[in-house]
Image: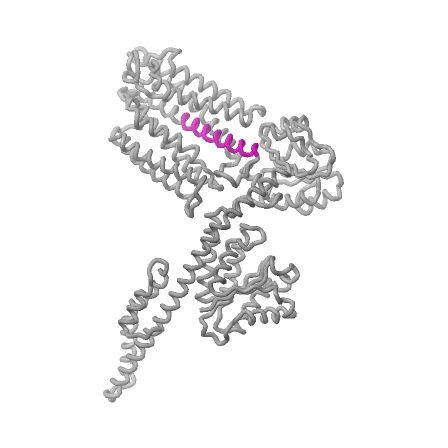
Amino acid sequence: MDRLRVLCFAGMYGLALVAELARVVVRAHNRPLATPILTAVGWVVQAAYLARLAWVQQKLPVTTLFESMLVLSWILAGIALYLMLRSPKNAAVGLFALPIALGLLIYAGLDSSTRGSGWSDWRGRVAFWGTVHGVFLLAGAVSTCLAFVAGLMYLAQLNRLKRKQSPARGISLPSLEQSERLNRGAIMFAFPLLTLGLFIGVILALASRGDGGVRLALNDPKVLSGAVMWLVFAALLNARFRPSMRGRRVVVLTMVAFAFLVFAWVGVDLLRLPTGHGGPRVSARGPQDAGRTP
Amino acid sequence: MKLLALGVDHRTAAAPLREALAFEGARLDAGLDALAHTFPGYEFVILSTCNRVEIYAAGDNDGDVDLGSDDLASFLATFHAIPPESLAGRLVGYHDEGAVDHLFSVAASLESLVLGEGQILGQVKQAYEAAQARRTVGPILHAAFQQALRVGKRIREETGMDQGRVSVASVAVDLAREVFDTFDDKTVLVIGAGKMGDLTLQHLKTLNPGRIMVANRGAERAEAAASRWGGTVLPWDRLYQGLIDADLVVSTTASEEPIVTLEQYRRVQRARRNRLALILDIAIPRDFDPRVGELEQVALYNVDDLRAQAESNRARRQKGIDPARAIIERETAACLALLRHRKHAGSVLRQLGDRADAIRVRELDALFATQTELSTEQRQAIEHMSRRLQNQLLHHPRAALRTAAEAAEREHPHTLLNAVRHLFGLAES
């Protein structure tokens, strides 16, 4: 039933994406409204679903990978909707943001392993700090996705300008300055959130070792990819103060950070890599045993 | 019903004649008043822009004068005190369907000097509003102009005819918007005070940049250009500093050699912490080393690039002509159908009212003839009651007829009109 509901609002985002793609070829009377309206409908339905989930469970829906992906896609779709409505040029923001929201929903809806126990079985302080850890990483992931989307828009616009293509042709894109500012702002937000999230995660893992909790090794793929992602973000933050690193190089680094995020969130599970992250079990081997929180 | 459009445009009359025929400011109001006075019973709108002067007239064929193109031509000559011979062969007239089609084409900018330009739609709206203010617009021109404004907007949205600019100088504005988001915090540097730079700056000024600097070898011309555009003069020997401060550079010098080399601009970019820069090098020979465009965060366009963009936009607008014509054809037919239906409905409504009035008066006369003892107050009360009764009985048929006339495109109102005629025994008009 959950899968059906998820695919229901994923369908709305899918239609919104189709409407956005149609802008390249079709010029209809109410064209600029189709994508925001469809996205808004999907977003409201998803908000209602998440609210119901929180009400039934009596806690924030961020305790499993399934829930986290749903919340992440919901926030991303909301930000995309805001940018679509704010854009003075009717820029095709949806073309870059909606595929990510859609991808998250499809993965969450189709892969039943994302519904693992996570830390939903935990109690007391561990459960509280587990939730804080998850919320920070989720917010960091939102910022990373946003930085990635802004980076893609920047590259597309830069490519068009360098090739001397007419702005009147093809899709409308945000200005280079706007994409660069969005990318920079998202990176600035992402770094402290990820730092705090990872820090709490490490403390949590150390604290719960004694009572049969999470056993995380330094070479755990989730730990490794998380650490590398954090390093890339540190480099990105540093790049902000280095003039030579502005523009395309920052965008490329953002993409690397995003790749590590995707790997940490879904790659480890997709590749069935052994990880002890996210669940109360001592030794997690494969997706059925391990909780799959990020 | 009669519709007429008569006037001159950039194709039929040279600028001096268009100037002589122009209705500007108070002349527009005076012209509308004079038309209404000379041709009572007709509706008028005057569209007067720098590229066209046109009078739109409409009437129901029941005015005191049978208005024709010659009458309007004589009016123009008399009003502007110009010899009628000077208008010979210059005026172009359109009648009925042709007049509506022409109005829609004008609103859609298909008749404009620059195809797809956006100004004309606002000018059509202003002309309509001016006529409304002088009360020279009636139901026919009201419907036609309202529809024209909708058609103009629709064609721009659906065909993309207003997308992209078509002159080399104005393309700069589109490019600036692709690079920058805000302009009140940006500095524009114009190198060279030539005609092309002036023209480009004229367009860039619409973006309201925070600061404009003009650098030229000759200080006098730089000062003239700077004062014209509200900028400051940058001494030629401080050009390097100007490049560091500027976000948008327009270069138009007549220098034989590039004035900015790759190495020089690389240093500039380093000094400006690699901020985004847009350089429009419209000088021939070029002022900037073309390799500057390969630097990070720099977009460099030369005059050929700008011309290519303008050409590409022009070609795109040309492609929109056929779809725009198809829309105009459909909308013209719909507009004329609406006007015809309104006219028929109006005729039936009048007949209905007249017939009801005749019956009511006849019956009242018969009643008062037999009831001679009724006082004047009693007679007035009965007459008042009969009028109210008549109005209440006819309220719904009248409303239904009006609705049917408005919905002419979807439903054929003749069915309802015929039914009302049949039910109330009205004659065919």
Comparing B61 with A5, the one in front is B61
Stretch of the chain drawn in magenta? A140-163
Report x, y in % for residue A274.
34, 13
| Quadrant of the image containing the C terminus of chain A | top left
- Relative placement, left or right, of B116 versus B250 is left
Tell me what residue is drawn at x 74 percent, y 35 percent.
Answer: B256
Report x, y in % for residue A106.
33, 29
Residue A52: say if magenta: no
Q: Is residue B102 above or below residue A166?
A: below
Q: Quadrant of residue B405?
A: bottom left
The total number of labels drawn is 0
Comparing A54 with B348, the one in front is B348
Residue B189, visible in the rendered structure: no
Tell me what residue is drawn at x 36 percent, y 40 percent.
Answer: A38
Comparing B254 with A176, the one in front is B254
| Quadrant of the image containing the N terminus of chain A | top left
Q: Quadrant of residue A80?
A: top left
